[in-house]
Image: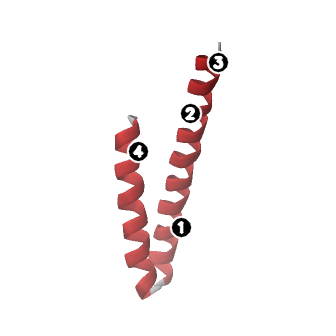
């Protein structure tokens, strides 16, 4: 997945979570938790990718 696509998905997920949490229905909170988990995964993936790029540039 391209970096730009990840950022778009993260933005979309976080906006949805914000909107969902306003109502706070239990089913919606579970869905929000899943979106947050996916967002955290994407962030970790991006961090790992940046670390690899930095290491490659050092050598």
**x%, y% of residue 56?**
60, 18
Of residue 31 and residue 8, the one placed in the foreground of this image is 8
Q: Eyeballing the image, is 49 above or below 37? A: above
Disc 1: which residue: 33
Q: Residue at x 35, y 41 (%)?
A: 4
Q: Quadrant of residue 2?
A: top left
Disc 2: which residue: 50
Callout 3: helix, strand or loop? helix
**x%, y% of residue 16?**
37, 69
Of badges 2 and 1, nearer the viewer stands: 2
Q: CA distance from mark 3 to mark 4?
A: 25 Å
Q: Residue at x 37, y 68 (%)?
A: 15
Q: Quadrant of residue 58?
A: top right
Kindly indicate whether the residue at mark 2 contacts the one at mark 3 (C-beta within 8 angstroms).
no
Q: CA distance from mark 2 to mark 4?
A: 13 Å
Which quarter shows the C terminus?
top right
Of badges 2 and 4, nearer the viewer stands: 2
Q: CA distance from mark 3 to mark 2?
A: 12 Å
Q: Which mark is residue 6?
A: 4
Callout 4: helix, strand or loop? helix
Disc 3: which residue: 58
Q: CA distance from mark 4 to mark 1?
A: 18 Å
């Amino acid at each position: 997945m391209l970096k730009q696509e990840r950022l778009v998905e993260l933005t979309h997920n976080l906006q949805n979570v914000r909107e969902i949490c306003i109502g706070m229905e239990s089913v919606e909170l579970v869905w929000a938790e899943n979106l947050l988990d996916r967002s955290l995964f994407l962030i970790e993936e991006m961090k790992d990718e940046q670390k690899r790029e930095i290491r490659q540039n050092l050598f």
